[in-house]
Amino acid sequence: MSSGPGAAVLLSPVTGPPRPVDPREPVVRLEDQALTRGDGIFETLHVLDGTAYKFDAHHARLAASARTADLPAPPQDVCRAALAMGLDAAGPGSHDPSRDLGAEHSVKLSVSRGVPGGEPWAWLTVSPVPPQTFEARQDGVSVLLLERGHDPAEDSGMPWLLPGVKTLSYAVNMAAVRHARANGAQDVVFTTSTDRRILEGATSSVVCARTSPGQPPTLVTPEPSRGILPGTSQARIFDAARRHGWGVDYGPLHPRDLLEADAVWLTSSVRLAVPVTRVDGHPVRSDPALTRTLTDFLLGRADG
């Protein structure tokens, strides 16, 4: 399977109309500020059997990021047209061998500020979900707790720090993942430096479960007021959990809460609900049945 995108669609200007381009051909100018400064925003969508089932939530977050970053966001109709064009050209999706949910694609929609003095533009890429994503869903991941360096809640009154914005500047996040892998883990969960509160993963939200015999589970995630990126997957899981009579709560969480939980997951759009197996080398309980239910919540397939 190719590691590159199966299809690409260009939005220049951002408001469209979209046009397909060859994903193997260069389209970014060397001085583009998305390339040289990470000055842009993006969303990653999971497409299942041709449907981007969280499209509205992703577009709403993209629009919110655009407002804070002073960038235009492609309108919904333009995004939908670009998505349909990309899926038509992308070829078949991939299938999870451990639990075939359907044909899966990963879609990334990015907006760049463009070259200095130029206009913002956007592009969309479509790729089959890669095998390593399926492996993480099945086997889980070990995580390393790393300090963020400051409490992102302090950024909430400073819009120039882009709190809660999904920017293209992920160099710190990727450096954290490399550090974790160099130290025997597979992923990262960030904490505050002062009181070691759990924040979020490098590319995911953190969700844990508490269970009691004869009672519905309770799901807990860090409080959204901490200045972390609002997770579309976590929000969808919590909405479904409420409808099914489960408890939901919002932090604070500390390392001990993860170690004492009945299950912990990293949730994100394409990886879905990935079980955490170890935290700083310490084993964490997992529950395959709960993982399956969270996945069903996320995909809108829970039967109650």
Image (cartoon, helix red, strand yellow):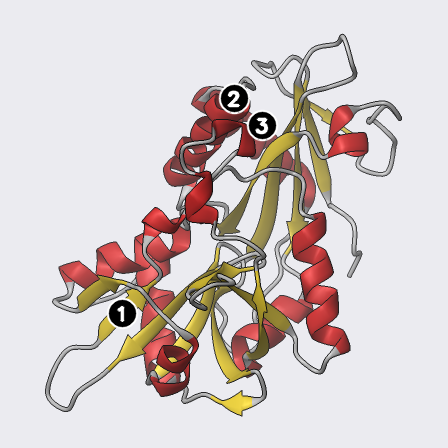
Q: Quadrant of residue 211?
A: bottom left
x then y, percent, for residue 300: 31, 57
Relative depth, front residue between 104 and 161:
161
Give the crowd class for mark 3: few <14, some 14-19, many >=20 residues within 10 Å.
many
Looking at the image, is mark 1 or mark 3 nearer the viewer?
1
> Can you tell which of label 2 and label 1 is closer to the viewer?
1
Secondary-structure class at tag 3: helix
Please state which amino acid type lies under the numbered disc 3: Ala
- Give the residue type at disc 2: Ala
Q: Amino acid at mark 1?
A: Leu
Q: Is residue 98 above or below residue 205?
A: below
Q: Toward which corner of the image does residue 82 lie, by quadrant?
A: top right
| For the residues bearing labels 2 and 1, Cβ distance under 8 angstroms | no
Disc 2 or 3, which lies upstream in sequence? Answer: 2
The CA span between labels 1 and 3 is: 35 Å
Residue 73 is marked as 2
| Nearest the eye: 155 or 243 | 155
x and y, in percent, of residue 35 in the image: 79, 33
Residue at x 68%, y 62% (from the top left corner)? 176
The residue carrying mark 3 is: 82
Q: Which residue in the protein does label 1 denote? A: 219
Instruction: Report how far apart the C-alphas of labels 2 and 3 lie in the structure.
Output: 13 Å
